[in-house]
Image (cartoon, grey):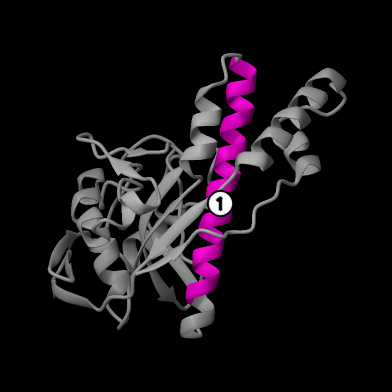
Amino acid sequence: MTILDNIPFDLDLDQMIIDLRLANRNRHIREFRELADEARALAWPKALYLEQEPTIIADKIVRIAGETFESQVLQINLAQSDKVFPALATCGRELDEWRASKTNILHQFWAKSITDSALEAAVTDFKRKIKKEHKIKFVSIMTPGSLMDWPLPQQEPLFRLFGDGAQRIGVTLNESFLMSPESTISCLAFSSETHFYTCQLCSNFDCRRRQADFDKSLLKTKYRLVTTGPQIGSGYQA
């Protein structure tokens, strides 16, 4: 297991001001910059990953280190892979507790965008490390719950792979298979010939986190599915 707890993190405030539609709102911009300064002082994003060998058992069934995962998309994505990297990334409890302390609704919204940025920094860092260590061109990820084909209860076997690693970076999983801190993802990372995004298989066009267009032909031809749909709301799209 590799634990990353010295992850570079900064905020592109100019871009965030545009994304949050704060341009020309001087008072709001001032308040947002003050929040960003608070976050920078506290931010400690973290991640971990393992290196494992996947075993394809049957259609939809993959076994990793004794744990069984059921997903047709996952099985097809790992069919040609001799390595898979169970991974966990989080904004960190420090930043999550700061976000939760905000009582102003607008400040809560801004703070969530900041914690999500810290999560993205953690994801970028572990993917960069995997690419460098294993000389992989593209690292793609799949997260339990992002598609109906790989539902949220699959968090349970994934967390068993992490052992006490999740606790070491401050992440917990509750009985509903939801993680804390809120800005956290668990996933299986793998080498791919091109970038793979679960968005390509999801027809939830209103998702503000969409990273790629829905590809109906890819869904039918490669993954042999009619639909996958979003399994939960607008979760982190990989």
Q: Main secondary structure of the magenta part?
A: helix
**Rendered residue at 28%/64% (across/down):** 74
Q: Which residue is mark 1?
A: 120
Q: Is residue 53 left or right of residue 217?
A: left
Q: On screen, 200 above or below 28?
A: below
- Residue 177 percent coordinates (x, y): 25, 40
Q: Is residue 110 left or right of residue 180?
A: right
Most distant residue in the top direction: 104
What segment is highlighted magenta in the picture?
105-130
Asked whether residue 73 is drawn in magenta, I would say no
Front one among 181 and 226: 181
Quadrant assignment for the N terminus: bottom left
Q: On screen, 99 above or below 133?
A: above
**Rendered residue at 22%/59% (across/down):** 71
Front one among 5 and 83: 5
- Residue 101 percent coordinates (x, y): 53, 22
The kind of residue on which mark 1 rests is Glu
- Residue 68 percent coordinates (x, y): 14, 63
Q: Quadrant of residue 77?
A: bottom left
- Residue 232 percent coordinates (x, y): 33, 37
Asked whether residue 129 is drawn in magenta, I would say yes
Label 1 element class: helix
**Rendered residue at 35%/42% (across/down):** 230
Q: Is residue 25 left or right of residue 93?
A: right
Front one among 33 and 93: 93
Quadrant assignment for the C terminus: bottom left
Q: Is residue 159 visible?
A: yes
> How many C-alpha atoms fall within 10 Å of the one at disc 1: few (<14), some, or many (≥20)?
many
Q: Is residue 207 visible?
A: no
Total of numbered circles in the picture?
1
Q: On screen, 86 above or below 156?
A: below
**Rendered residue at 59%/15% (across/down):** 105
